[in-house]
Image (cartoon, rainbow, N blue to C red):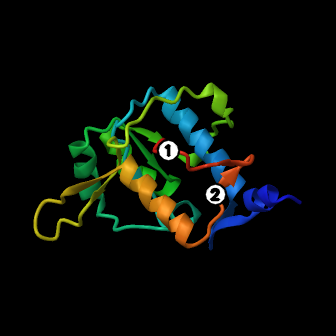
Amino acid sequence: MTQQEVTMHGRLAIHADGQFTYDELHCAALRLAAVLHNNHVAVEERIPLCMRKSKWTIAAIYKPPPKRLLALTERLDARLVVTDQTMSTVFIPSGLTIVTYRSGVPRVPESRLALGKLSASAAAFIYFTSGSTGTPKGVVLEHGNLYAAIREVTKTREIQVHCDGEPLLTGAWY
């Protein structure tokens, strides 16, 4: 087995409800990308992600109560939400398009996904504070900053981030 095969088939995330290899996560990301592409999601469009703690969210952050989740979704002017089966019930009254991994989307070759150009200053995600002192505040993390952080972590921890002999992190495109 080559180093690439070991890396792609190595376990990436382990949780009580299952695990992922790098390859499985890559395939899941392509499926999600296909769903977002089919829903004509634009660069920097705000798409809420809301899932319970599972193999999908190994690194979890504070989850507000349902009423606040709906209010934050409204503030984002979102038209769809990526969630899991359990959390999807929270968003039914909102009228948002609900996307779950169980949506049954087949894997789509990367070559068929039209990826838009991103600048390093484009928003990667918005993290909301708990709002314990009033209204939750959104903190924007840009692609360039996220890329730099991931690159530094992979360097300092000597993590191999390659696929098909090519580096997965080649620019602020993710």
Is 58 situated above or below 137? Answer: below
Q: Which of the 4 image quadrants contains residue 43?
A: top left
Residue 83 place in picture, x, y as percent: 46, 50
The residues bearing labels 2 and 1 have C-alpha atoms spaced at a distance of 13 Å
Q: Can residue 162 be seen in this snapshot?
A: yes
| Secondary structure type for disc 1 | loop
Closer to the camera in the image, 110 or 2 = 2
Reading the image, the residue beneath label 1 is 171
**Between 104 and 10, which is closer to the camera in this rendering?**
10
Q: Residue at x 68, y 32 (%)?
A: 109
Mark 2: amino acid: Val
**Looking at this view, is 151 or 26 the one in front?**
151
Which quarter shows the N terminus? Answer: bottom right
User: Hey, what amino acid is under mark 1?
Assistant: Gly
Q: Residue furthest left?
A: 134
Left/right placement of residue 49 relative to residue 132 reads right
Residue drawn at x 57%, y 33% is 34
Mark 1 neighbour class, 10 Å CA radius: few under 14, some 14 to 19, many 20 or more: some
Q: Is residue 50 visible?
A: no
- Residue 131: percent from left, percent from top: 18, 65
Label 2 CA crowd tier, 10 Å (few <14, some 14–19, many 20+): some
Q: Residue at x 39, y 30 (%)?
A: 42
Look at mark 2 in the image and give the residue it sits on. 161
Name the spot of residue 145 as percent of width and height, x first: 37, 54
